Image (cartoon, grey):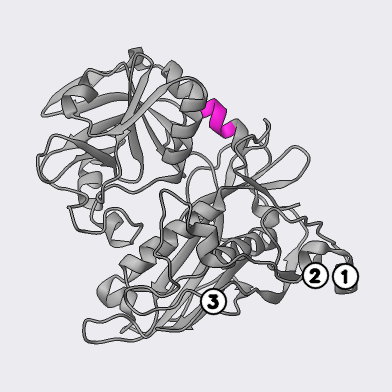
């Protein structure tokens, strides 16, 4: 197996050029991505105009943890140059062990500083770690795509970074800055470049984690935190692919409650849906759609994705009000749909409206856009579109995935190129 010594210095501005040399480290001085000094904007100026992930005009969270300016990773890693033995035509959404992962630590009240790329593998945690005892943890999900000209594209990584920062504030955790997050993602993707599927065959799923790794016995924030990123090549999330999925509405168990953590991507939110999801899948359904926990008549979201209904030229989705995750694909589909002439509303959506809809679809990083073929509610099933993919779902799926894969011009300014 041929390898090349590559020093990944994740310290460039968003969209900076990268041209990987598969020779020796002495040639790295020719590479602007690997040698450019840091160039960062102050954190608050990056975020103060963001309507969905607003942060206080300060660098200190309510739990007293600091949000540091970005610093980089300068890790010598050996990047294999041979191809991987994967049947890209049959790959599903499952874990594949890749070459490298990224890790960075800081103490409570401190700042994240230097991270490093290390071989993918197990991590060591004390049984007293905050994440194991009190669930103090967050995760994100985004994808990298390979283009026909062998470039590598990321889709809106700054949105994931800002959402992690908001979640960290809610969970009393320090967080990497936006620039730290993005540069760590870039470094991890490039260190695992050979695992990115060919164009049109899938994507490289990127999983950033932020966990309370320090030991704690009494209920309190952990004294130490670890930011970690690993990646895995993936295909479709649902086995149906773009074919319609079948959902059942859950009326007894709830994903989130007002005042809770439903609007942040904390790990406990997902463990809480496993029981209902498992029961639904045992009965042949693809997943579960949850209702609000107060009135039990307004739509919230599916286990891991947002929900949309279509009626004529109008598209509606539940508004973000503390119990629903502000999905980045959700936000993107809203903008794409409006740009294509649809009337889009973010508001309370009732079960009755859902059952009367012309079309229904879900959105999420993993699923992108997934059409819904049927909804079962209180024992009765309603089907949509004669079991085919709805026209609106197909249109929006095509528009967004073509943008993500670099097949159309990025007039939204959402794509970050790594080469």
Q: Residues within 10 Å of mark 1 (few under 14, many from 20)?
A: few
Q: Position of residue 324 (x, y in %)?
A: 29, 47
Q: Position of residue 228 (x, y in %)?
A: 51, 69
Q: Is 366 placed left or right of 216 in the picture?
A: right
- Callouts 2 and 3 close, C-beta under 8 Å: no
Distance (Cα) linking label 2 and label 3: 20 Å
Secondary structure of the residue carrying numbered label 2: helix
Circle number at residue 382:
none
Q: Is 170 placed left or right of 124 in the picture?
A: left
Q: Residues within 10 Å of mark 2 (few under 14, many from 20)?
A: some
Residue 139 appearing in the image: no
Query: Quarter of the image containing the N terminus?
Result: bottom right
Residue at image coords 50%, 80%: 111
Q: Is 242 placed left or right of 378 in the picture?
A: right
Identify residue for label 2.
35
Circle number at residue 29:
1
Distance (Cα) linking label 3 and label 1: 25 Å
Magenta stretch: give its range.
397-401
Mark 3 / mark 1, whichever is N-terminal: 1
Identify residue for label 3.
104
Q: Position of residue 281 (x, y in %)?
A: 27, 40
Camera-nearest residue between 285 and 227: 227
Secondary structure of the residue carrying numbered label 1: helix
Q: Is residue 243 magenta?
A: no
Distance (Cα) linking label 1 and label 2: 6 Å
Mark count: 3
């Amino acid at each position: 197996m041929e390898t090349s010594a590559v020093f990944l210095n994740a310290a460039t501005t968003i969209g900076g050029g990268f041209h990987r040399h598969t020779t020796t480290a002495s040639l790295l001085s020719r590479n602007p991505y690997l040698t450019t000094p840091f160039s960062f904007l102050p954190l608050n100026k990056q975020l103060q105009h963001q309507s969905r992930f607003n942060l206080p005009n300060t660098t200190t969270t309510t739990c007293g943890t600091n949000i540091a300016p970005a610093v980089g990773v300068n890790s010598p890693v050996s990047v294999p140059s041979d191809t991987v033995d994967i049947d890209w035509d049959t790959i599903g959404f499952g874990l594949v062990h890749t070459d490298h992962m990224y890790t960075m630590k800081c103490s409570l009240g401190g700042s994240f500083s230097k991270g490093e790329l290390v071989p993918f593998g197990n991590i060591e945690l004390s049984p007293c770690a905050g994440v194991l005892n009190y669930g103090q943890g967050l995760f994100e999900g985004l994808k990298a795509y390979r283009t026909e000209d062998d470039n590598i594209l990321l889709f809106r990584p700054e949105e994931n970074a800002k959402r992690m920062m908001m979640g960290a504030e809610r969970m009393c955790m320090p967080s990497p800055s936006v620039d730290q997050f993005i540069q760590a993602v870039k470094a991890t993707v490039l260190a695992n470049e050979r695992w990115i599927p060919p164009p049109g065959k899938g994507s490289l799923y990127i999983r950033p984690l932020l966990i309370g790794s320090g030991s704690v016995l009494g209920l309190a924030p952990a004294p130490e935190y670890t930011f970690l990123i690993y990646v895995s090549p993936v295909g479709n999330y649902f086995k149906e692919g773009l074919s319609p999925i079948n959902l059942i509405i859950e009326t007894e168990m709830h994903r989130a409650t007002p005042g809770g953590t439903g609007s942040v991507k904390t790990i406990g939110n997902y463990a809480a849906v496993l029981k209902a999801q498992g029961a639904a899948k045992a009965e042949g359904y693809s997943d579960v759609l949850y209702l609000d926990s107060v009135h039990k008549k307004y739509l919230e979201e599916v286990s891991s994705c947002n929900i949309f209904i279509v009626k004529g030229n109008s598209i509606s989705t539940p508004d973000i009000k503390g119990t629903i995750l502000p999905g980045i694909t959700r936000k993107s589909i809203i903008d794409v749909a409006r740009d294509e002439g649809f009337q889009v509303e973010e508001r309370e959506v009732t079960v009755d409206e859902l059952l009367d809809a012309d079309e229904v679809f879900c959105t999420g990083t993993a699923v992108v856009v997934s059409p819904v073929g049927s909804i079962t509610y209180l024992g009765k099933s309603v089907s949509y579109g004669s079991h085919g993919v709805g026209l609106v779902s197909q249109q929006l799926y095509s528009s967004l995935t073509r943008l993500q894969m670099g097949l159309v011009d990025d007039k939204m300014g959402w794509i970050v190129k790594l080469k």
